Image: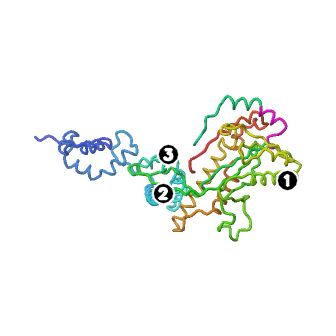
Amino acid sequence: MATKRVLKSLSIEEKYKLLKEVEGGLKKKKAAEKFSIPASTVSTIFKNKESIITSFESGVRLGSKRIKTPVLQNIDKATLDWFKAARHQNMPISGGILKEKAKEFAKRFGDDHFMASTGWLDKWKQRYAVGYKRACGESNDVSEVNCEKWKKDVLPNLLKKYCGRDVFNANESGLFFKCLPDETLTFKNQKCYGGKNSKQQVTLMLAANMDGSEKFKILLIGKSAKPRCFRGIKWLPVHYKANSKAWMTVQIFEEWVLNLDKRFQSTGRKILLFIDNCPAHPKDVQSKLKTIELAYFPPNMTSKLQPLDQGVIQNLKVSYRTKIVKEALKRIEANEKQDITLMDCINHVTKAWDIDVKNQTIANCFKKAGFGQYSEWEEEEDIPLSFFKYY
């Protein structure tokens, strides 16, 4: 009497191992014998090779025999197609932007409950072999001992005459306003090309007080005195100045701080303004000021002592670049010209400064720089700083 044939069903993990061994040189007939399955089953496994590998690499349960597919396959597929198209145009895509796009597709498909969680994103990246790559900070050696000595011996004497709301820090920062993020999601088996980033630069002068309750209007310095994109514009949300290098100069700084002084004269308020020790900030301007006391950080210590350098400027630039990436994506989908103008820069950087840079972030950065221990604001809950890349 013939022995009854026992059918064996391989798990996804076993099928994956079989595929890898055959790809490594093992004959299909030998693989069938090794895994105790018919040769025809080996052929069937190879027909489903792509789905088996995708399912295994997406993290199936050990012993699972069913091919795992995304729960919301239509959202996955639409997001993947969009991602491929965006990367084809060398557009940097962050995880946050990808999640926003997935939620947009979910709404188109009538699913208002899809949250595009971090867990979903992690599994999506596993399924399609997507990871982060760089498409393209500098810090001098700073004496911690000298910084601590300044905080202990100098800072308290400067602060003792002022309350937290009257202590300000102002700092310049360059911004390549057409530059997109230099990291992007891309397929792991492909080289990463991000396109050539524009080097058109502006300088931003930012200023805020110690408790984060007051932020001065941005002073933005460009190269052109009358940019073409300003035609027809009667009012700007920033103070705009220009010179051939788009740099801060003695003349621009003096004009800025003198106008600020007049503003505080009208209210009878006196403030302490911390600035870095650079040639564009001449010390003799103090004699022209009536309501502002200037305090200069020691040379070569601003990376540790200047509050805006502790994360405020980074926070602003992260928010700004997120906004111009979204703007660029909209223009791609609308087949519009992608050039970011100076007016686009002004609008986006103003929104980032006014809305996205929170007062708690500013206050935390003052604390990180050593100011918090002398401030009445220290009684508030210490909220940790957190910044997210490009979204």
Q: Is residue 219 placed above or below 33 in the rendered structure?
A: below
* Residue position for label 1: 262
Question: Crowding near pointer 2: few (<14 within 10 Å), some, many (20+)?
Answer: some
Magenta span includes 142: no
Residue found at the far bottom of this picture: 232
Which of the two labelled residues, at mark 2 and mark 3, occupies the earlier sequence position? 3
Given residues 104 and 219, the one toward you in this image is 219
Whether label 1 touches label 3, CB < 8 Å? no
Q: Name the secondary structure under disc 3.
A: helix
Circle number at residue 119: 3
Q: Is residue 91 placed above or below 306 in the rendered structure?
A: below
Q: Name the secondary structure under disc 2.
A: loop
The span from disc 1 to disc 3 (Cα, nearest Å) is 54 Å
Residue 160 % position (x, y): 83, 35
Circle number at residue 199: none
Question: Crowding near pointer 3: few (<14 within 10 Å), some, many (20+)?
Answer: few
Q: What stretch is highlighted in magenta?
A: 154-166
Q: Look at discs 1 and 3 and give the one toward the viewer.
A: 1
Residue 19 % position (x, y): 27, 45
